[in-house]
Image (cartoon, rainbow, N blue to C red):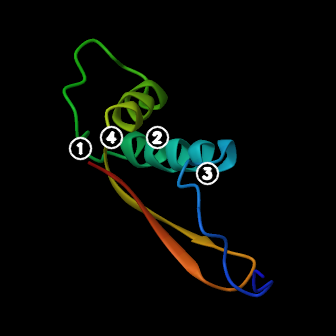
Amino acid sequence: MTDPISPPSEITYQLTKYEIARVIGIRATQIAEGAEPFIEVGNLIKPYDIAVKEFESNKLPIVIIRTLPNGDKILISLFQ
């Protein structure tokens, strides 16, 4: 018999579309205000495009803190 209070045995670490949008938006704002990109930008000009490329290449040193319904917190690192 499973204890109904215990956390689920498998927790997904896939980011939601809202988390992705927030991370890219915050990083694009940082780049627009003069932060150095973590990747080689090449011919990219728009901060949004640079932020998306950084996100897709897993170069962002950002940690998402996700709170579970039982109050536990999960740390999800975007840097690999």
For the residues labelled 1 and 4, say whether their Cβ atoms are less than 8 Å apart.
Answer: no
The residue that disc 3 covers is 19
The x and y percentages for residue 77 are 38, 59
| Towards the viewer: 8 or 12 | 8
Q: Secondary structure at mark 2?
A: helix
Q: Considering only order in the chain, which callout, 1 or 3, is on the residue closer to the N terminus? A: 3
The crowding category of the residue bearing disc 3, from other C-alpha atoms within 10 Å (few below 14, some 14 to 19, many at least 20), is: few
The x and y percentages for residue 56 are 40, 31
- Number of the front mark, 1 or 4: 4
The residue that disc 2 covers is 28
Q: Considering only order in the chain, which callout, 2 or 3, is on the residue closer to the N terminus? A: 3
Q: Amino acid at mark 4?
A: Asn
Q: Secondary structure at mark 4?
A: loop
The residue that disc 1 covers is 36
The crowding category of the residue bearing disc 1, from other C-alpha atoms within 10 Å (few below 14, some 14 to 19, many at least 20), is: few
Q: Is residue 78 left or right of residue 20?
A: left
In the rendered image, the vertical position of residue 18 relative to residue 63, given as above or below:
above
3D distance between C-alphas at marks 3 and 1: 22 Å
Q: Amino acid at mark 1?
A: Glu
Q: Which mark is residue 27?
A: none
Q: Which mark is residue 58?
A: 4
Q: Is residue 64 left or right of residue 30?
A: right
For the residues labelled 3 and 4, say whether their Cβ atoms are less than 8 Å apart.
Answer: no
